[in-house]
Image (cartoon, rainbow, N blue to C red):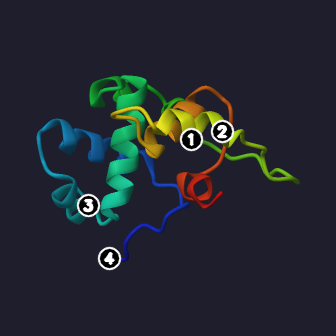
Amino acid sequence: MPKHRQGDLLPMEKIREILRLHELGYSQGQIARSCAVARSTVQDYVRRASAKGLSYEQLCQLSDAQAKALLGKGQRQVRSQPEEIAFEPIHQELQRKGVTLALLWQEGVNGGQWNLSYASFCCR
């Protein structure tokens, strides 16, 4: 079975399975093999759910559309111009212990500061 490509949307059943296995204590590599997705995809969904404080049980209570919206994986809006990002504050935050680029990206997505993939954020 082909692995999931970055940027494609997964069915909610697979996303819920990723989170269920994570809560059962399986490693990201084991989950990736079981769900036929990249380990980075597992990491992305686990990170998104953790940032929102969402458990597997909570996701099961939501509709697919609600769950995807909470995880930031709903329909993306097409923008005519690239979003402007102030990188000076990001650079300053990265100097602090324990702060990662992934954490700052997730905070920006959750706060509505930008709506772009982690890869696009890193490229900029």
Residue assigned mark 3:
32
The residue type indicated by label 3 comes to Ala
Q: Nearer the viewer, mark 3 or mark 1?
A: 1
Task: Work out whether 115 lies above or below 118.
Answer: above
The residue type indicated by label 1 comes to His
At x 12%, y 38%, the residue is: 24
Q: Position of residue 9 (x, y in %)?
A: 52, 55
Residue assigned mark 1:
91
Instruction: Tell me whether circle 1 and circle 2 mark residues in contact (CB < 8 Å).
Output: yes
Task: Work out whether 77 lies above or below 66.
Answer: below
Direction bottom: furthest residue: 2
Q: Which mark is residue 88?
A: 2
The residue type indicated by label 2 comes to Glu
The residue type indicated by label 4 comes to Met
Cα–Cα span, label 1 and label 2: 5 Å
Q: Quadrant of the C terminus?
A: bottom right
Q: Which mark is residue 1?
A: 4
